[in-house]
Amino acid sequence: MTTDATRASSSAVPSARSRPALEIAVTSAAGAVTARDGGADRVELCSALELGGVTPSQGLVEATVATGVPVHALVRCRPGGFAYDADELDVMVREIRALVRSGVAGVVVGALREDRSLDVDAVRWFVEAALDAAAQQPGTTPQQPAETPARARGSRPVPGVSPLEPRPLQITVHRAVDRAADPVAAVAALAGIGVTRVLTSGGASTVGAGLATGVLPRMVEAAGDVQVMAGGGVQLGDVPALVAAGVDAVHLSAKRAQAVRASSSRSASVVSLGTEASTDSWFETDPELVRAARHALDQA
C-alpha cells in the first residue's frame, strides 16, 4: 500500500477568509465523507484519478452530493490533453448541465487551443452553460453579469440531508493552464468571464517547482479577482510557502492505493483486463493525510 499527499488548491480571496480552505480530490462518496471529517471545506469529485481525472458518473455525483459536502465536479470527457473538437465540447456542455441539475456546488472545467493558449471561447461556453443550468434550478436567483463573482444559486435540497443555505454556483478552471504556453497569460485571460477560481501548480509538474521558478506567485498577481488554488504534487512542507505566496486554499488528492487481494483459491495466472494499475488497484482517501493537511493550513 502506498500513500500520496499530492495536490493543493486555493479557494478564496485572502480578505474573504480567516483561514486557508482545504479541498480534497475524491473519487467516491466515502472519500468525500473522509475528507469532510478530516476538516476539508469541499471536495473535487472525479473518476479515473490515475489518468488525471474525468467526469464522474451520474450515480456517483448524486451519492456524493447526498453526503452534504460541497461537491465540485470535474468536467473532462477524456484523458490526454485539453484541446477539444466541437463534438467533445458539446459533450462537456451536456455534462455541465447534468451536474448542475444534480446539485453540485461547482464545476471544474478548462480547455486549450492547439497553439496551447487558453481557449477562452470554450471556457465562456462552459460558464454560460453552468450559469444557465443553475438559473433554471428551483430557488435560484437570476443570472448575474459575468464580471460579478456571485452567480446564480445552483444547489437544491437532497433527500436525507438537512437543507443548507443555497450558495452561488462556483466555476473552477483546472490545471489545463499549467499546460499553456504562457500560464501567467492564461490566468490573466480568465478575468471578467465568470470564473470563480483557477487551480494551478505554477506551470510546473509540482507546486514546489512552480514556487521555485516564481511563476506561481506571478499567477497570483495576474489573477485579479479570480481566486488561485495551488495544486499539483503538494507536500505538507509546501503549505507555509504556498500561503505566503498568496494562495488561500490547498487541494490535495490525499490518496492511498489499494490493491485487489488475490484469492488463495485462484490460479497464480490472472487474466489481464488492461494495465495492472487500472484493473487491480484503486485510490482511497487517506484520513491521516487529510487531517495533516488541515493542521498544516491552520498553522500556516
Image (tube, rainbow, N blue to C red):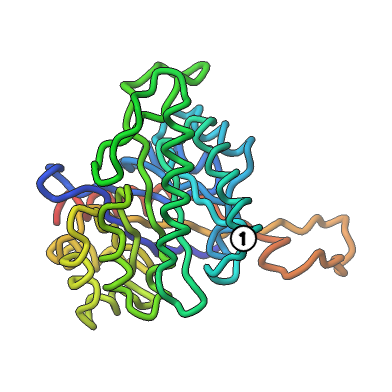
Q: In the depicted view, which residue is nearer to us: 219 or 143?
A: 143
Q: In the depicted view, which residue is nearer to us: 21 or 287?
A: 21
Percent x, y of residue 87:
66, 58
Please tell me how crowded label 1 is: few (under 14), some (14-19), or many (20+) other residues with Cα within 10 Å.
few
Visible in this render: residue 274? yes
Q: Is 13 located above or below residue 243 in the figure?
A: above
Q: Could you tell me which quadrant the N terminus lies in?
A: bottom right
Q: Quadrant of residue 239?
A: bottom left
Q: Is residue 99 left or right of residue 130?
A: right
Percent x, y of residue 268:
85, 68
Q: In the depicted view, which residue is nearer to us: 20 or 228?
A: 228
Query: Mark 1 sits on what residue?
Result: 86
Visible in this render: residue 258? no
Q: Is 29 located above or below residue 280 in the figure?
A: above
Q: Residue furthest bottom?
A: 213
Give the residue drawn at x 41%, y 33%. 69
Q: Amino acid at mark 1?
A: Ala
Q: Is 79 located above or below residue 36 in the figure?
A: below
Q: Could you tell me which quadrant the C terminus lies in?
A: bottom left
